Amino acid sequence: MKENNIEQIRHSLAHLLGAAVLKKYPNTKLGIGPAIEHGFYYDFEFKKTPGDQELHELEKIMREFIKQNLEFSEEKITPAQARKQFAKQTFKLDLIKEFVKEKKQLTLSKTSDIFVDLCRGGHVANTKKINPDGFKLTHSAGAYWRGDEKNTQLTRIYGLAFASKEELDAHLTMLEEAKKRDHKKLGPALDLFIFSDLVGAGLPLFTPKGTIVRDLLDNYVWELRQKHGYERVDIPHITKKELYETSGHWEKFEDELFRITTREKHVFALKPMNCPHHTQIYARKKWSYRDLPQRYASTTKVYRDEQTGELSGIQRARSFTQDDAHVFSRKENLEYEMRAIWSIIDTFYGSFGFPLEVHLSMSNPKQPKKYLGNPKIWNEAEDIIRAVALKHLGKSAFENNVKTDIGQAAFYGPKIDFIAKDSLGRNSQVATIQLDLNMPERFDLTCINEEGKAERIFMIHAAIMGSIERFMAALIEHTAGKFPVWLSPIQIRILPISEKFSDYADMVKTKLIEQGIRVELSFPHETLGKRIRDAELEKIPYTVIVGEKEKSTKTVNIRHYTEGNIGELNLEKFLERIVNEVQKKIRS
């Protein structure tokens, strides 16, 4: 690792932030300060939370430290030495206790003689390796100590850090663009969804326009699945707790479940996932090996008791809709089935211009209690996952592009996770293919093999969008609300110049509707310029203007939401153009 590695720079800046805070606010209690993607943060317990002006002053102090060419060093210390060093730092003493319990080595980090921290290292050797113009303190937020809401709430100060001012400025520009594209603002502005205080936080309500988008996305996934032999099923929104006790979800996600107690005192739960229900559809009868694979798909809402501070528009909500499918298969068919799902994922995300990064999410052998099943089953499942990725991508792409994430497996099996990169270069976890060797064991799912004996089957979990809501959030921000024509809730708005051309506008509308196009007619109650601007703000793909010339020549004058003014087109030619865009799901 190079001495000026960006992660080392970010980690070092976290220490400089700690030093700056203690210089300005000497009695502040210190939490932790790691490097994170694009920067760093540090948690503090202040007597009074600093505002924007104070953050600016802390930045100045940090830059003064950088100019002093301060050196970073680490030394191993005993628990007694650590407790003496941090005698007045409550949260550091808490960390020391935790490290001692877990038998971790304690390391003292020094920033010359201005700051001492409990840290395992990973800093630059000297502050002269840090560009003083390459970082910026951005904001502060509340954060519970160790992420537990039962603990003290601290103030987390965030900073951005890059190797150069140019990289920092580029990132800040991207963040400004991201604010404009924020789905939490654009979604309601485009009349796609709303939230109601009376309904509750994290429970989105979708408008007619938003529901069109949801249904089109779901229908597209179903269209792709249907070609591979999937069948639709339907399941209830609640279940007895015994179902989740058998599957293992009750023990694992007990705190995230919405519970219902009936009048007869039976305990039910609102379903947080669909897989256990699907196992019971499979288990309804005995299957021959000739009947497999069985492929079940259902798009249905699930519910999770997310904490209020974790909610984020429709990206993370308490109610969301999974485009869920499960395949019940013999081992010999697993590769084919998983690659078929992968091909659906490639087609779907390719339609929207999302490049995909592939991650193999595996178990962590050092944390066996996190997972169901025995190590032998896990080794077998992970070998299958690797083989599928290798064969689907080829050796070169597999070795160069696939990342292995140890410890990120689901509690019941390893998975292939797909990360979509949007037009601003940001990553979102979207689709997933999960191999489950545990649920078939827990529910005793079998088929009758060639020898007439019961054979344990395998189960594949497959969500293409992950959730419709999360994908919509990513797509809104990826496209800045300018959906492809086939997906736009209103595809065309017709603007007659004056009332006397309303009959011609109505005829154009009728022809478009006959072709299945979603169209609105805007009568001239306001100026043409105002109506054009309104259509642009609503991200309507085509604005069709008709007047005397268009009526006499049977043409339409067209404006496009990305191409601008296209000009006159023969009406029939325009119909061909838009029908082609819709049928082929062309990206605009």
Image: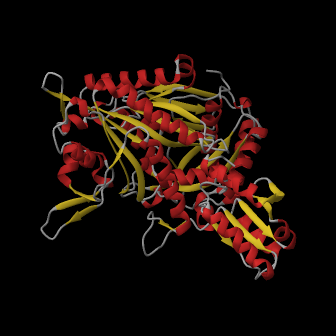
User: Which quarter of the rendering shows the N terminus?
Assistant: top right
Q: Tell which of 316 and 81 is nearer to you.
A: 316
> 496 or 360, which lies in front?
496
- The correct choice, above or below, for 244 with respect to 99 in the image is below
Q: Residue furthest top?
A: 395
The image position of residue 323, as x and y in percent, is: 42, 49
Q: Kindly identify the residue that appears in the image at 66 percent across and 46 percent down.
A: 587
Q: Relative to 385, is 408 above or below?
A: below
Residue 372: x percent and y percent?
26, 35
* Visible residue check, residue 465: no
Is 266 on the left-hand or right-hand side of 370? left
**Furthest residue in direction right, as rendered:** 549
**Colour scheme employed for the rendering of this structure:** secondary structure
Q: Is residue 348 visible?
A: yes
Q: x and y percent of residue 421 in the render?
A: 60, 40
Q: Residue at x 62, y 35 (%)?
A: 12
Residue positioned 30% across, 26% down in the render: 378
Q: How many discs mark residues in the rendered view? A: 0
Q: Is residue 384 left or right of residue 210?
A: left
508 lies left or right of 310: right
The picture places residue 353, in percent across and down from the top left corner, at: 63, 42
Q: Position of 106 compared to 569: left or right?
A: left
